[in-house]
Amino acid sequence: MSAPVSTASLANKFLGAGLAGLAVTALGLFVSDAHGVALSYVVGITYWTAVAIGMLMLILIHHIVDAGWSTVIRRQFEHGLSAFKWLFILFIPLLVSVWLKPGFVWPWMDLGHALHGGHGTVGEDILYQKKASFLNRNMFTGMTLAFFAGWVWLSARLRKASFTQDGDGAAKRTFMNRKTAAFGIPINALALSFAAIYWMKSLEYHWFSTMYGVWFFANCMRAALAFGVVITWWLYTRGDYKGVLNTNQLHCLVALAYAFVVFWAYVTFSQYFLIWNANVPEETFWYNIREHGDWLWVGMLLLFGHFFVPFLSWLSYRRKSTLKPALVISIWVAFIILVDLCYNVLPALKDAHDEPLPFLSINLLWVLSSVIGVGGICVWSYLKSFATAKLIPIRDPRIVESLTHHEATAP
């Protein structure tokens, strides 16, 4: 069941691309607006962290419900978890900036930072004062360290038990991962929610939303499932999954992605509707500044591209159970999630008239270089892990059930 071709060369190519992307992003700090480059990097690292978080949650859900069909696919998500330690290392520059140059990335960390519109400073702002026990450098740093510690620890436990089971076939490894899932799901849920609040929502800390963590959770799951389809296609075209993957396994994977299309729409619409209906200035301003200029069209792209395109495309059973259509739609979903993160982060960049900088700007270059940089490292980590274990969990108690899931027709 091992890979028929060495992935070392491919891994080195992605490592080179990742280092090049990071170098371009670092160069941007000296040739462009440093704050814009920093926020673009926040988009890039949050995007790939979301993919890893979604993979972690899918594995935890797999174990807690004792799923059968997903066993042959689970191993690839386990390899994806290897990226967490590198994501932490890549996040360190942001943590360093918090202490060496407060307010450089998150303006509220500098109490002397002037508020937009000339309404005093952050330290004088009553809304900040009410949130100061939560929004401060110590809490931000400690919580971020706790997020990554939890993700790395949970990932290590899950991977070790699963990989060890390939050798000894002990059922206790499965029970161990089930216990890990029992406490891992609430840990991961809290971590991803607070990470979204600290890293993105706090950029405009005046804003209130009780659904922001759930919105981020939906995007994490959608991103992980989209890349799950991409990985499945790659392994099938390489020949690894031929005779292993069948139509119903793929259909279940894409059907789950389809369910989260609807879930994302429900959460996003609910957030918008509740804020619109309440009509409270501390809530509505966030949408108001995104309904002008080219940000309005970005919002329309999210409405139709994030929901209607995958929803209508995946209504067809054939597009859910055939690799090529599933791949194309999944790539689109992965792209639109990146646009969604830009929509949430980049409008925090304001011009002299207190208006958000346009979407079509030089900052998109730094978003691209950041996504390539961080993504290259993550894919390199996945490929390095890929070569260290069996293609599928060959001695998992559910493996036979998974391999014979309903039918054996190739996708």
Image (tube, rainbow, N blue to C red):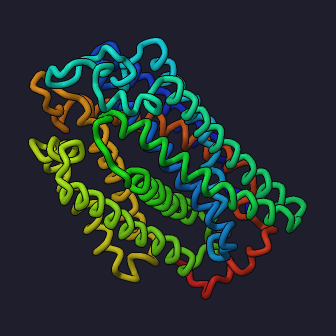
Query: Left or right: where does residue 102 sit relative to residue 293?
Result: right
Instruction: Name the spot of residue 246 as percent of width and height, x first.
Output: 58, 78
Residue beneath the point at 23% across and 61% down: 273
Q: Nearer the viewer, residue 322 or 275?
A: 275
Instruction: Name the spot of residue 335 as percent of width and height, x first.
Output: 34, 51
The answer, for residue 312, to whether it is visible in the render is yes
- Dividing the image into 4 quarters, which one contains the N terminus? bottom right
Residue beneath the point at 86% across and 68% down: 171
Identity of the residue furthest to the bottom in this view: 406
Q: Answer with the quarter of the image where residue 101 lies.
A: top left
Query: Left or right: where does residue 317 sit relative to residue 165?
Result: left
Q: Answer with the quarter of the image where residue 20 lies.
A: top left
In the image, residue 213 sits, relative to residue 170, either above or below, namely: above
Residue beneath the point at 19% across and 32% down: 361
The answer, for residue 38, to whether it is visible in the render is no
Q: Answer with the quarter of the image where residue 257 lies.
A: bottom left
Instruction: Name the spot of residue 307 as percent of width and height, x first.
Output: 29, 65
Q: Nearer the viewer, residue 34 or 272?
A: 272
In the image, residue 337 sits, relative to residue 369, either above or below, namely: below
In the image, residue 328 sits, relative to residue 292, either above or below, namely: below
